[in-house]
Image: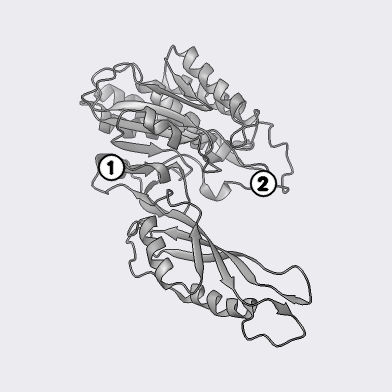
């Protein structure tokens, strides 16, 4: 099958995925569609919950393993939609629909990439394609639940919309529940231990605090107060004020280190909801990154969270589409972005997986790129 035929089938799969509701933990329908793809191409696969994965045909236990991963769950459509979020429709080169950009275009492109290399012998890496669930909710039954079932993963490409640029690092996340306590009282009486007034100093501390280590790629750790809750009667000073603190962690700290520092220094009680969503990165010297740079791709650090957070191996975030469209009303991806994305994925892995590329193969790839740009 030619790359163009594979691309056509991948776009058709994306249209089916868009038309099938797949909120986090409710991805049964889209998992079945992905299974059907593998069945069509006679590719053995496994499924656990709503996660579906498959290995390349000539798997060799002595070779390192390259994980290809993207997710097929979506957020719920927001109230700003003017179109049917489940109607996959192409208008002026844009494929509209919920999950088209985040991360359906990446998912079908990686599935097409995996299918392209599935039967090829003598690859430098084994391949495993994992279409994962519950990414949007960071749920317990997503990629993190599949990893223990896989052989050791040496490196990963995680499909998220990056305009096919190379996200070589990604910030981690820790959400803290904070508590400021005071003395409850009637509003008519003096109170020198007023929980809400005490919170003013706490908020100022969080606003001003800076972590010392700054990343060359991801910049500073970003600490933001995002929620505040206190009181339920106009004439009662509450005993406590609850805050929620969102901390985006660079690659200079582990989440455990962030917790240790804030527990020691912050002027209030802090409880982390989870410490497992760590920052991730891949050395710029890695052959995947170098292959991308050779193809004219640029490197950058990503502020958004993905399934990279549950990986312990080096990982590269890379995919068609634009992150700024994610979770937006009337979400879309350009069809051309998928076409170019599949070809760029193939060219990237040709440089990494294949010991010797033929001139004819490179020529066919270049001709295809020219055809889709004209």
Q: Is residue 194 above or below residue 171?
A: below
Per the rendering, the mark at residue 329 is: 2
User: Which quarter shows the N terminus?
Assistant: top left
Write the residue at 43% across / 67% down. 263
Residue 248 occupies quadrant: bottom left
Of residues 44 and 41, the one nearer the viewer is 44
Of residues 268 and 85, the one nearer the viewer is 268
x and y percent of residue 146 in the render? 43, 31
x and y percent of residue 172 in the render? 42, 53
Q: Nearer the viewer, mark 2 or mark 1?
A: 2
Q: Is residue 141 above or below residue 253?
A: above
Residue 192 occupies quadrant: bottom right
Write the residue at 45% across / 14% down. 41
The Cα atoms of the two marked residues, 2 and 1, are separated by 35 Å
Mark 1 element type: helix
Q: Is residue 240 above or below residue 85?
A: below
Q: Is residue 192 above or below residue 83?
A: below
Left or right relative to 334: residue 249: left
Left or right relative to 267: residue 187: right
Total marks shown come to 2
Residue 97 occupies quadrant: top right
**Tag 1 residue:** 294
Write the residue at 73% across / 36% down. 84
x and y percent of residue 229 in the render? 66, 66
- The reply to whether callout 2 and callout 1 are in contact (CB within 8 Å) is no
Q: Earlier in the sequence, mark 2 or mark 1?
A: 1
x and y percent of residue 280 in the render? 36, 49
Mark 2 element type: loop
Characterize the local packing of mark 2: few (<14), some (14-19) or many (20 or more) Cα atoms within 10 angstroms: some
């Amino acid at each position: 099958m030619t790359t163009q035929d594979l691309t056509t089938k991948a776009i058709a799969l994306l249209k089916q995925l868009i038309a099938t509701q797949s909120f986090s933990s409710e991805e049964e329908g889209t998992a079945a569609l992905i299974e059907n793809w593998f069945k069509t191409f006679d590719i053995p696969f496994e499924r656990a919950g709503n996660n579906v994965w498959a290995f390349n045909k000539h798997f060799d236990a002595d070779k390192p393993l390259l994980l290809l991963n993207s997710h097929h769950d979506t957020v719920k459509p927001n109230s700003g939609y003017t179109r049917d979020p489940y109607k996959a429709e192409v208008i002026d080169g844009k494929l509209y629909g919920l999950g088209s950009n985040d991360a359906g275009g990446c998912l079908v492109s990686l599935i097409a990439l995996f299918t392209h290399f599935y039967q090829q012998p003598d690859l430098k890496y084994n391949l495993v394609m994992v279409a994962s669930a519950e990414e949007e909710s960071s749920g317990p039954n997503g990629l993190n639940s599949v990893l223990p079932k896989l052989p050791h993963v040496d490196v990963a490409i995680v499909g998220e919309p990056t305009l096919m640029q190379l996200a070589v690092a990604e910030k981690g996340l820790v959400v803290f529940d904070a508590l400021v306590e005071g003395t409850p009282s009637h509003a008519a009486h003096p109170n020198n231990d007023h929980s809400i007034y005490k919170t003013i100093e706490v908020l100022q501390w969080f606003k001003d605090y800076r972590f010392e280590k700054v990343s060359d790629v991801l910049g500073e750790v970003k600490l933001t107060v995002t929620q505040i809750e206190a009181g339920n009667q106009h004439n009662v000073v509450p005993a406590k004020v609850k805050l929620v603190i969102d901390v985006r962690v660079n690659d200079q700290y582990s989440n455990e280190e962030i917790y240790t520092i804030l527990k020691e220094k912050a002027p209030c009680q802090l409880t982390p909801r989870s410490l497992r969503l760590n920052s991730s990165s891949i050395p710029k010297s890695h052959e995947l990154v170098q292959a991308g740079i050779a193809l004219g791709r640029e490197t950058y650090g990503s502020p958004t969270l993905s399934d990279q957070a549950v990986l312990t191996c080096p990982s590269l975030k890379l995919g068609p589409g634009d992150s700024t469209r994610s979770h937006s009303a009337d979400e879309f991806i350009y069809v051309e972005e998928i076409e170019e994305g599949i070809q760029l994925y193939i060219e990237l892995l040709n440089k990494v997986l294949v010991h010797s590329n033929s001139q004819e193969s490179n020529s066919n790839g270049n001709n295809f790129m020219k055809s889709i740009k004209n």
